[in-house]
Image (spheres, rainbow, N blue to C red):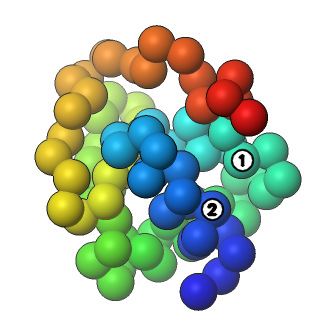
Amino acid sequence: MLEQEEAVLNMLRRYKVLRIEDLSSGLLDFSWSQLISPSTGLAERNMIALRRVGLSYQIRPMNQEWTLGEGQQHEEPPAHHR
């Protein structure tokens, strides 16, 4: 598993459901493109689910229910938890 894939999965273990933008703000060691490609790969292998919400996407582990509705955000962005 790629380092980026492991980082995405670790964030999902902590936050359960994330907007795709949360990845780049929460994983500052990686560029946007270094996170999108692994996220797509994880989705293709049925490890995470992607769902379009407005102009963005939400991601979650396959065994987790969607908890964020359209337009909802986390109370505090993941970057503040580093």
- Name the amino acid, label 1: Leu
Image coordinates for residue 23, horizontal then vertical, percent: 60, 45
Image coordinates for residue 53, horizontal then vertical, percent: 29, 34
Instruction: Please name the residue shown 80% across and 45% down the image.
Output: 28
Measure the alpha-carbon separation of dots 2 and 1.
Answer: 8 Å
Image coordinates for residue 73, horizontal then vertical, percent: 41, 19
In contact (CB < 8 Å): disc 2 and disc 1: yes
Instruction: Please name the residue shown 34% across and 79% down the image.
Output: 44
Number of the label disc, if any, that sits on residue 45: none
Image quarter where the C terminus lies is: top right
To which residue does mark 1 refer? 27
Residue 67 quadrant: top left
Asked if residue 70 is positioned above or below residue 18 in the image, the reply reads above
Asked if residue 44 is positioned above or below residue 61 in the image, the reply reads below
Image quarter where the N terminus lies is: bottom right
Q: Residue furthest top?
A: 75
Left or right of 5? Residue 4 is right
Q: Residue furthest right?
A: 29
Left or right of 4? Residue 60 is left
Instruction: Please name the residue shown 66% across and 29% down the image.
Output: 81
- Mark 1 element type: loop
Sequence-wise first label, 2 or 1: 2
Number of the label disc, if any, that sits on residue 7: 2
- Name the amino acid, label 2: Ala
